[in-house]
Amino acid sequence: MRQVSLREFRTRGAKALEKVPEGEVVLLSGQNGPAYFLVPAIGDLAKMDEELRKQIALADLRENPQWAKSMGYDKLTMD
């Protein structure tokens, strides 16, 4: 998964994505962390789905750290 700044994507558009291999998920990150995921319409969807779910879960944990801690999710590993 590649990461591109939201500012760069807004100003440069497609040129900001030129270095990203075709079929790879892109994480657009802002000042406060992950903002958007760009998911290609073609490619290995099973592989992308796993990586996308992982990144969405991490973004949720960053957004709601108090809730995650109260549920014990702060002690989970990537495995």
Image (cartoon, rainbow, N blue to C red):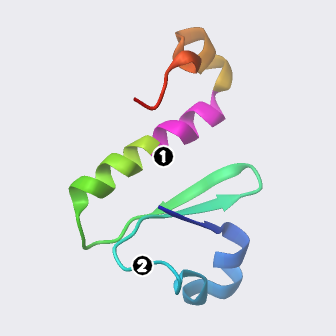
- In this view, 68 is above or below 72: below
- In this view, 20 is above or below 75: below
Label 1: few (<14), some or many (≥20) within 10 Å? some
Secondary structure type for disc 2: loop
At horizontal 24% and vertical 70% (from top left) the residue drawn is 43
Location of residue 36 by image quarter: bottom right
Residue 49 forms part of the magenta stretch: no
Secondary structure type for disc 1: helix
Task: Give the residue at mark 1.
Answer: 55
Label 2: few (<14), some or many (≥20) within 10 Å? few
Q: Nearer the viewer, mark 2 or mark 1?
A: 2
Which disc number belongs to residue 21? 2
5 lies left or right of 55: right
The C terminus lies in which quarter of the figure?
Answer: top left
Q: In the image shown, does 1 or 13 lie closer to the viewer?
A: 1
Tell me where residue 53 appears, x and y as whole percent.
38, 44
Q: What amino acid type should be assigned to the residue bearing mark 2?
A: Pro
**Mostly what secondary structure, the magenta segment?**
helix
Residue 58 forms part of the magenta stretch: yes
At horizontal 39% and vertical 69% (from top left) the residue drawn is 24
Tell me where residue 48 appears, x and y as whole percent.
32, 57
Location of residue 54 by image quarter: top left
Most distant residue in the right direction = 31
- Label 2 – label 1 distance at C-alpha: 18 Å
At horizontal 55% and vertical 36% (from top left) the residue drawn is 60
At horizontal 66% and vertical 87% (from top left) the residue drawn is 12
Tell me where residue 22 appears, x and y as whole percent.
37, 80
Q: What amino acid type should be assigned to the residue bearing mark 1?
A: Gln
Instruction: State which region is magenta.
Output: 55-64
51 lies left or right of 17: left
74 lies left or right of 46: right
Tell me where residue 67 appears, x and y as whole percent.
60, 18
